[in-house]
């Protein structure tokens, strides 16, 4: 590794042992990055140097637009606040908690430019989940939207390492007003860690994925350049939060890499997304299949006429959604699969190479294959585990699951696929306990742990169940303790309990009460049997 610019070496010190890293492949000329690299210099400052400072960059849901020069000035002021007023040092971890907005993007970029490590969090996370993240990443500084302070302050009470929370609405503007509008980017190494992304783990404990400055550019120069093929005149929009690396790439990195603009919506519901499409006229959209299905039922002819590229990821794209979107808009949805461990999409297809029903081919710069249970390569037409490698890859922070995700130098994603004789990959199922619903990754064991804290629950098992509207929903099979009624009131009580305990999107939308759960002779829960039960059940009743 190159000489680090980090004064605080925590991130580098907590990388997994080098022997457990995947093989990194830099097969394209554009993926050969210099030893010294700050991603923000390439994403933002380069456009000013090229004379494009007056071009639009970040756009709010109200239509307020910042140019590249205005964005750079705000980023520089925030970086000055960090290194001056707040005593920030390169390598410090900074937690971000806010809905998508130009200001959130500016703070994100400022932390990177100052040599920090961003720890972005989902706005819906509760205190218990935030507490784990703060402790795991040893976060001492946070920026928070005023409407979201409550859960963060509650988390901070038990985590003395977090010593400063900056209210983005009240504190930050005054600090920025007193700061200079110029800032020399930190002389970071291309392999300095700049992002810790937390993802739900199948054991219920979130995993911390670590990414470097070069990784942020690599996904732009692989998927962005060779599959997405966006241009400076494009205007991006989408629903994923910037705390998801899908959202970070699709709504910040890809547009800024080519000098395009991006619309950042604070409320990403289908209604808000459609309203912004009508008034702000984007050309590129990133969202999950669930959102595309919802838009189909709301939009009138011409509402989405400005769009030319539509990317679908976050969950499997049903063929029916692909065909309905094509019929309604004339646009071919570009499916893709990515992973927080890989940072972004590594299998997809350009519009002219899309095969309906297939996820696509390995993105240029990446290699993918299907392997058996022992790690051996399977021939085309076989169903097995997906393995991938390229310029990005899994590096969990101090986590024994590193050895499970990386096998023989390949990242094994937890997805079951078939590769045909033409190199197209066809999604079959998840091969672990992750549930992907409406684009959210939800670990079944985490929901089980929450349910088990309710006094009426004796035991439970959680799996994904098919759902026409959402693709997949969280379904819980619950054994109650004696004296409790198996009825709708109890189901609602359990759902409300989970919503209050962990992020609300994780709650079980369907609950079935059973007398016993399927277990092995040694008492281990057989989730595959619950999956069979979910398929055999009548269509699940889902809560709104």
Image: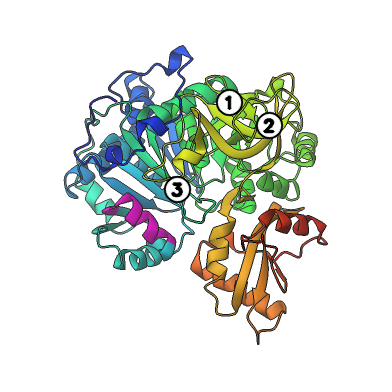
Asked if labels 1 and 3 touch by Cβ distance under 8 angstroms, the answer is: no
- In which quadrant will I find the C terminus? bottom right
**Number of the front mark, 3 or 1:** 3
As for residue 137 lying within the magenta part, the answer is yes
Q: CA distance from mark 3 to mark 1?
A: 28 Å
Residue 390: x and y in percent read 50, 24
Decide which of 90, 158 is in the foreground and name it: 158
Residue 333 seen: no
Asked if labels 2 and 1 touch by Cβ distance under 8 angstroms, the answer is: no
Q: Which mark is residue 194?
A: none
Span shown in magenta: 129-141
Look at the numbered disc 3 and give the secondary structure of its residue. Answer: strand
Residue 350, quarter of the rendered image: top right
As for residue 414 lying within the magenta part, the answer is no
When the figure is inspected, residue 354 is found, relative to residue 492, above or below; the finding is above
Residue 502: x and y in percent read 50, 64
Residue 343: x and y in percent read 48, 35
Decide which of 485, 250 is in the foreground and name it: 485
**Number of the front mark, 1 or 2:** 2
Q: Which mark is residue 359?
A: 2
Asked if labels 2 and 3 touch by Cβ distance under 8 angstroms, the answer is: no
């Amino acid at each position: 590794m190159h000489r680090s610019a980090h004064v605080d070496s925590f991130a580098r010190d907590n990388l997994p042992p080098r022997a457990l890293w995947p093989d990194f492949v830099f097969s394209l000329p554009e993926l050969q990055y210099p030893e010294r690299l700050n991603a923000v210099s390439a994403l933002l400052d380069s456009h000013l140097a090229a004379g494009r400072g007056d071009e639009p960059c970040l756009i709010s849901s109200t239509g307020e637009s910042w140019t590249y020069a205005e964005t750079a000035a705000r980023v520089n002021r925030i970086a000055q606040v960090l290194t001056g007023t707040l005593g920030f040092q390169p390598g410090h971890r900074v937690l971000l908690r806010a809905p998508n907005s130009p200001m959130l993007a500016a703070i994100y970029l400022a932390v990177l430019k100052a040599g920090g490590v961003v720890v972005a969090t989902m706005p819906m996370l509760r205190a218990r989940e935030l507490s784990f993240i703060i402790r795991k990443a040893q976060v001492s500084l946070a920026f928070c939207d005023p409407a979201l302070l409550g859960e963060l302050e509650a988390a901070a009470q038990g985590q003395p390492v977090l010593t400063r929370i900056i209210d983005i609405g009240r504190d930050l503007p005054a600090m920025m007003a007193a700061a200079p509008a110029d800032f020399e980017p930190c002389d970071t190494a291309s392999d300095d860690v700049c992002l810790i992304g937390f993802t739900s783990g199948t054991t219920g404990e979130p995993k911390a994925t670590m990414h470097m400055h070069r990784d942020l550019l690599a996904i732009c120069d692989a998927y962005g350049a060779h599959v997405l093929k966006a241009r400076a005149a494009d205007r991006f929009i989408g629903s994923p939060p910037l705390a998801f690396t899908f959202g970070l790439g699709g709504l910040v990195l890809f547009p800024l890499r080519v000098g395009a603009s991006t619309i950042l919506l604070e409320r990403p519901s289908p209604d808000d997304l459609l309203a912004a499409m009508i008034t702000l006229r984007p050309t590129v959209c990133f969202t999950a299949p669930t959102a595309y299905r919802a838009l189909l039922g709301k939009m009138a002819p011409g509402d989405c006429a400005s769009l030319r590229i539509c990317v679908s990821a976050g969950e499997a794209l049903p063929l029916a959604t692909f065909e309905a979107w094509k019929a309604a808009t004339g646009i071919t949805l570009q499916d893709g699969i990515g992973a927080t461990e890989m940072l972004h999409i590594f299998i997809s297809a350009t519009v002219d190479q899309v095969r309906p029903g297939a996820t696509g081919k390995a993105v240029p710069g990446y290699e993918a294959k299907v392997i058996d249970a022992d790690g051996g390569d399977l021939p085309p037409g076989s169903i097995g585990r997906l393995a991938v490698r390229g310029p990005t890859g899994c590096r969990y922070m101090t986590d024994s699951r590193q050895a499970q995700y990386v096998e023989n130098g390949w990242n094994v994603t937890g997805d079951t696929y078939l590769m045909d004789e033409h190199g197209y990959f066809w999604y079959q199922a998840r091969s672990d306990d992750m549930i992907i619903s409406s684009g959210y990754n939800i670990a079944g064991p985490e929901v089980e742990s929450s349910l088990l804290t309710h006094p009426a629950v004796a035991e439970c098992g959680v799996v994904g169940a098919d759902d026409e509207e959402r693709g997949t929903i969280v379904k819980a099979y619950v054994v109650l303790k004696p004296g409790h009624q198996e009825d709708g009131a109890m189901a609602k009580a359990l759902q409300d309990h989970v919503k209050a305990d962990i992020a609300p999107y994780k709650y079980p939308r369907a609950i079935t009460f059973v007398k016993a759960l399927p277990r092995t002779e040694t008492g281990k829960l057989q989730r595959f049997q619950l999956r069979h039960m979910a398929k055999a059940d009548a269509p699940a009743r889902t809560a709104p």
